[in-house]
Amino acid sequence: MSAAGVSVREALYEPPGPKMRKKIVLATIISLAALAALVVVIIRQFYITGQLDARYWSFFTRATTWKFLGRGLVGTLEASVVAGIVAFAAGFLLMLGRISSVKAVRGISIALIEFTRGVPTLLLIYFFFLVAPQFGLKLPPLWKIAAPVAISACGVVAEVLRSGVNAVPKGQREAALSLGMRNGKVFFKIVFPQAIRYVVPSLISELVIVVKDTTFAYVVNFPDLMQNARVLITNYDAMLSVYLLIAVIYIIINYLLNKASAMVAKRRNSKTIAQRNEKGVKNNYESTTE
């Protein structure tokens, strides 16, 4: 394979030799055995303390339980989508300010980006829940969780978008300007569409953080998955079983998002390699015909 067709992983990761492969297999077997032993010990401890009794698990056989959890899941997805959209819009504006030629605008954008990246999400949630109402800003529960989560994520989104803009070859912008196009049109017609394609996997990965941050919705009494789980725990006194199920649901959601990010990145890399190979074949053909 040519150097242009080598992925980042292939360039940084050297395939192990025969001895190293044997060591990896041995280490994997030992690790799996240790993990299996740990699981057995944990399950045994749960059995001794009575956490595996039927009364802690039987309510999962009822349709009402799953319907209640389903409503919580819809609430989680709703808060995540709203927060994601707001974070992208705010991050886009911060990115524009960050790359602005006006020094004052650039300085304000940098300060806001650093602020949103540095302040914990929970602190922002408490601000919207406890402080904002004192100034007359009364938001519905959905926005009390979506707004602070979006603010916490928008700084990272701005930096991700800026990295995509910087990845676009400067020659394309210069060529467009030489044809008489204005700066704004060059950015929105040429630079930004390419930048988005570069950073889509990173944006999807950031959505994983947004989904996990919505677990703080219990603070504002928004009926998301975690809040409904707390209701089940109160009603059935089944902390272990409920939290274990909720953890599995979150793992599945984040796993699917990570897989989507990996698929998008793989498709983009495949297209890039194909374009490079096609260009190489074309150049070789032209050189031979000359």
Image (cartoon, rainbow, N blue to C red):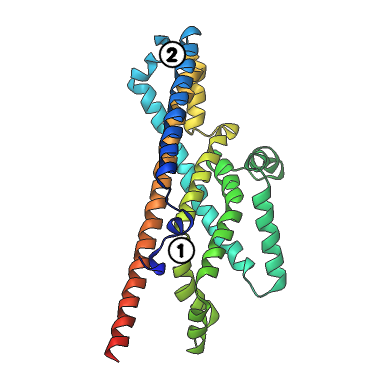
Q: Quadrant of the C terminus?
A: bottom left
Q: Is residue 77 visible?
A: yes
Q: Position of residue 248 (x, y in %)?
A: 43, 30
Residue 176, above or below 260: below
Residue 117, above or below 231: below
Q: Which of the 4 quarters of the picture holds residue 29?
A: top left
Residue ID for mark 1? 198
Residue ID for mark 2? 56
* Residue in the image at 55% along x and 59% along y: 160
Of 164 and 35, nearer the camera is 35
* Residue in the image at 40% along x and 51% along y: 262
Q: Position of residue 37 (x, y in %)?
A: 46, 20
* Residue in the image at 53% along x and 44% along y: 209
Element at badge 2? helix
Q: Please, what is the three-letter code of the amino acid marked with disc 1?
A: Tyr
Q: Residues within 10 Å of mark 2 (few under 14, many from 20)?
A: some
Of 90 and 128, nearer the camera is 90
Element at badge 1? helix
Disc number at residue 243? none
Q: Which of label 1 and label 2 is nearer to you?
A: 1
Q: Please, what is the three-letter code of the amino acid marked with disc 2?
A: Tyr
